[in-house]
Amino acid sequence: MRPNRRLFARTSETEYTEVLGSRDQSGWDHLLGRLDVCNLTEKDIIEIYEEGKHRRYGLLFAVNGAAFAIGKLLTGDPKSGPVVLGGMTVETLALAMILFSMIMTFDIYKFGERMKKLDRDLFQWPGQLVLAAFLILLAGGWSIVGFVSPTGSASLFAPGQ
C-alpha cells in the first residue's frame, strides 16, 4: 500500500493549496506549471509523467480504434456503393481522425516538454521519435482508408469525380 503523500499547488505568490492524493479525484495534469517543485521528489515527477503520458496515449488509441470500428460500419457492401451515416462518409471520418491524431500528438508533445522542465531526463529524443512515428502511422493509415480505392488508385484525385 502506498503511503498518502501531500502535494501542494501554488495558487498565488504566497498561498498553497493541498492537492488530493487520489488521481481519480483531482488528476495532476492541469496542475503542471503551478506545482511547487520543492515538494516533489523525483519519483513523484516520474509518476506524474507516466500517468499523464499513459492517459494521453490511451485516449489517442481508444478514439482511433473506435473510429476504425465506425469506419468499418460505414463501408458496408462494396457492390452497393459507399454507405453514408448521418452525412458522414469514410473520407470525412478519415480527415477527422487525421486532424484528431495531429491535435493529440501536439498535446502529448507539449505535455512532454512541460514535464521536461521538471526533470530534464524525461521526454528525450527516443520518446519524441516514437510519438512522431505514431502520428505518421496513424495519419498514413487513415489516408489509405479514406482516400485509396481498393484497386490502389487515390479516390481523391480520380478523374471524373
Image (spheres, helix red, strand yellow):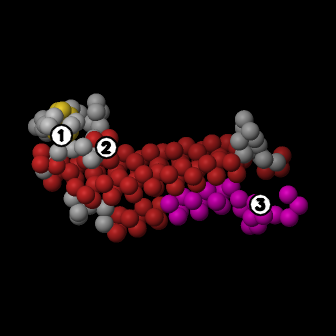
**From what the image shows, is residue 153 above or below residue 75?**
below
Quadrant of the snapshot with the N terminus: top left
Q: CA distance from mark 3 to mark 1?
A: 58 Å
* Residue annotated with mark 1: 13
Quadrant of the snapshot with the C terminus: bottom right
Q: Earlier in the sequence, mark 2 or mark 3?
A: 2
Q: Residue at x 15, y 54 (%)?
A: 42
Type of residue at label 1? Glu
* Residue annotated with mark 2: 29
Q: Which residues are magenta?
A: 135-161
Q: How many numbered discs sit on the rendered protein?
A: 3
Residue 75 drawn at (x, y percent): 72, 47
Side of 36 relative to 129 (left or right): left
As drawn, which residue projects farthest toward the right?
160
Would residue 150 be seen by someone viewing this image from the given angle?
Answer: no
How many C-alpha atoms fall within 10 Å of the one at disc 3: few (<14), some, or many (≥20)? some
Q: Residue at x 31, y 43 (%)?
A: 29
How many C-alpha atoms fall within 10 Å of the one at disc 1: few (<14), some, or many (≥20)? few
Contact, mark 2 vs mark 1 (Cβ under 8 Å): no
- Tell me, for residue 155, which label it has, or none: 3
How many C-alpha atoms fall within 10 Å of the one at disc 2: few (<14), some, or many (≥20)? some
Q: CA distance from mark 2 to mark 3?
A: 41 Å
Type of residue at label 3? Ser
Q: CA distance from mark 2 to mark 1?
A: 21 Å
Q: Mark 3: which secondary structure? A: loop
Q: Residue at x 77, y 60 (%)?
A: 155
Residue 14 drawn at (x, y percent): 14, 37
